[in-house]
Image (cartoon, rainbow, N blue to C red):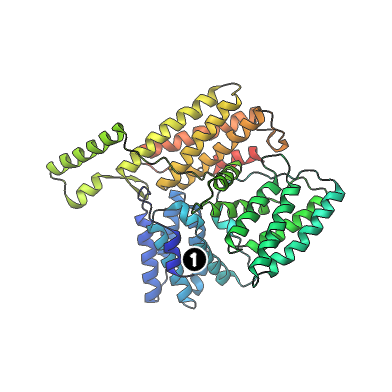
Amino acid sequence: MDASSIRLEIGFNPHGGALPDAEQALADARAAVRAGTDPFSGVHRAAAAFRTAGWMAAVLFTEAIDACTPIAHIQTPVYDNALYALSYAVSMRNLRALTRSPSLFECYRALRIAAEGEGVHVGYETFAMAGRIVPNATLARIPERDLGAVRERYETALLGALRGGVEPLVRESALVELEWCASALAGPEPLDMWRLAGACLRVLRERGMQLSDDRRLLAGFNMLLADQAAGATRAPRELVRSAVALLWRASSPPSGNAATRAEYDALLRDYGVCVGQPASPVDTPETLWEEAAARDEVRSRIARGLTGDALEVDRTRYIGPLVVAAGAYEDFLATADASMVSLSDAGRLSSPSSADAAHASEAAFRMAAASAALGLGQVGLLADALALVWRMRARAVAGARMSSVSGVSSRAGDAALSQGTDALRGALLRIAAGIPPLPLDQAIAKLGELID
């Protein structure tokens, strides 16, 4: 892994919030390492800023750096490279790309192994899915004879996929066979594990088995066949998270096939991961008027004597350690207002229809996209969890045969949705006042209990 790889994977996000406190803290930690002194203070200050902003993958990264601090002067290149890699990633203000960067993950993996030894396993999903609620995936009932035949074909093809490194055609043929096996086992439920596995196998074939943990995932699907043969009706949670993480990474950058992209996006939403971006401004009369008004406002501030740093400060907003552009902040609040109206309207209904629930889910996903774009990580995670519950409720109300969502339409479901919506509203009120939101872990965990 080198810095150029991270530059390719993490582009600058002009709408994202900056974390100057974290950047300065990491710079101080690098200076301490080079001076032969203890980087402890800088690392912990950076971790505190990441935690307040809800950048959960960055929190994990700083924890791994902290675990390596005792050997920082023994493995100085690894340690200094990790500090630089994280500092560069944070300076790009791109929370989504930071989470999905395979190069940054490999750096994180190297830190964990250096701190705890060669026997440590670090899965990509730990980094990519940090703080996320992921629902259970189901396994359809397959006649024993049919399952045995598919299992035999899978195991034969698996050998070809794992051994085909020097023969790309052999590997591709094997992956096509594995895709067939997944399609033969897939059931009708939206959260069917083999439906998710089939999409992952297609991604592996498209990317030439070049993704993190691809071999482990193939082996996990093989073990899943054994579990299913033994009567399991749900897939192991770790395997589900691994599969969703792989698909989450594959959703960026978008590839050419629009139909395939739409299929992946829908699957990710089924598992509570928003992949969309807030709508880009278009040159409507309203937005052109707003741009003109913004220019006039800047001119008036200059006329009042604001120049240089003072003018820049006047055009920025502070949310705890997060510093955001005034325009992006106002756009976020406008999206938040509209989304909360939709969520509140659906929550007030005693028995929302499937269409009402689907509308609320889309509103929450929009809220998640806007939060992630601005850099409000934990707010985005809570919005994603709310969107997932509403999406599951929409299917439950429509009569979908999903045993895993039976509690979503219960009184407990109503209470969890109400509490989650209230927590999100409270967070947005604090953000509107320029105050960082309180920790949202409890609200996310309550929704997670409902989803389980």
Residue 11, x across and y down, in percent:
40, 57
Of residues 406 and 257, which is closer to you in this image? 257
The residue located at (57%, 32%) in the rendering is 417
Image quadrant where residue 136 sits:
top right
Q: Is disc 1 surrounded by few (<14), some (14 to 19) or many (20+) residues within 10 Å?
A: many
Of residues 331 and 206, which is closer to you in this image? 206
Q: Is residue 8 above or below residue 183?
A: below
Of residues 145 and 343, which is closer to you in this image? 145
- In the picture provided, is 292 more to the left or to the right than 94? left
**What element does badge 1 sit on?**
helix
**Quadrant location of the C terminus?**
top right
- Determine the residue located farthest toward the right in the rendered image: 145
- In the picture provided, is 19 more to the left or to the right than 380? left
Of residues 370 and 438, which is closer to you in this image? 370
- Determine the residue located farthest toward the top in the rendered image: 350
The residue located at (59%, 30%) in the rendering is 415
The residue located at (67%, 69%) in the rendering is 164
Q: Is residue 372 above or below residue 1?
A: above
- In the picture provided, is 133 more to the left or to the right than 221? left
- In the picture provided, is 38 more to the left or to the right than 225? left
Residue 31 shows up from this direction: yes
Residue 410 shows up from this direction: no
Residue 294, x across and y down, in percent:
24, 39
The residue located at (55%, 44%) in the rendering is 262
Residue 379, x across and y down, in percent:
47, 42
Give the residue type that dot 1 points to.
Answer: Ile
Q: How many marks?
A: 1
The residue identified by callout 1 is 65
